[in-house]
Image: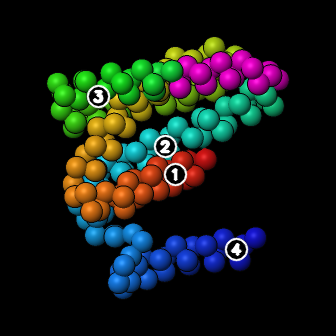
Amino acid sequence: ALWLGAAGVLLLIAFPFRERRAGSPVVDFALLKRRAFFGGASIIALQNMAMYPLLFQLPVFFDRVRGLGARPMGQALLALTLAMMVSSVAGGRLAERLGARAQTLLGSLVALAGLYWFSNFEAVHAPSDVIPGMLLMGLGVGMTSPPAQAASMSTVGPEQSGMAGGIVSTMRYIGGVAGA
């Protein structure tokens, strides 16, 4: 298993070098040099890095440590999902008033407050104890993702939009995998 991990790291390091010399690269790493593109994609990655551990570890915590079933935790996770849905829609309208940067900052602070809610697991005894944190995380991520993604995508022309969207999605999943 160790050799497999080492091979994966070597391939990850070699990939950008190979892509820079390719005539028609799969990933144009020059996009990452654009500040707004890199910033938006990085914010999305960092949020997923914070959110995915909650999605993976909280159900296990409540099942194995607290001895509760899956249903109560599913209801608590629903709070995160609903908050993300509502704030994503409302966030689009709010970004028009506040501006993308201000909303991204505000949403990130709300998400951090939600993450802080989970800093004391000794006080968590039931899924209802995590619902406020889930709501804050969902509101923050929902508020931040649309303007962060729009900021990234606004830096590219139509001919690069597919590649740029792929990079942003990849950053999202890299953040999630790193967090989990």
Extent of the magenta region: 66-81
Which numbered mark, 4 or 1, is in the foreground of this view?
Answer: 1
Decide: marks 2, 3 in contact (CB < 8 A)? no
Local crowd at mark 4 within 10 Å, few (<14), some, or many (≥20)? few
Report the side of 46 relative to 77 (left or right).
left
Q: From the viewer's perspective, is 29 left or right of 33?
A: right
Hey, which quadrant is residue 105 in on the image? Answer: top left
The amino acid type of the residue labelled 2 equals: Asn
Q: Where residue 4 is drawn, which disc sits there?
A: 4
Mark in front: 4 vs 3: 3
Mark 2 in CB contact with mark 1 (< 8 angstroms): yes
* Residue wearing tag 2: 48
Q: Position of residue 149 (x, y in %)?
A: 33, 44
Neighbours of disc 2 within 10 Å: few (<14), some (14-19), many (20+): many
Task: Tell me which numbered mark, 2 or 4, is placed earlier along the sequence.
Answer: 4
Distance of mark 3 from mark 1, alpha carbons? Answer: 23 Å
Please check the rendered image and state whether residue 152 is part of the magenta-colored stretch, yes or no. no
Which mark, by number, is residue 92?
3
Q: Nearer the viewer, residue 91 or 114?
A: 91
Does 165 sit left or right of 179 as displayed?
A: left
At label 3, which amino acid type do we have? Gly
Q: Earlier in the sequence, mark 2 or mark 3?
A: 2
- Give the amino acid at mark 4: Leu
- Residue drawn at point x = 50 percent, y = 45 percent: 49
In the image, residue 53 lies at what x, y percent?
60, 40
What residue appears at the point 67 percent right and 31 percent down from the top-left corner?
A: 58
In the image, farthest residue toward the front: 159
Residue appearing at x 61%, y 73% in the figure? 8
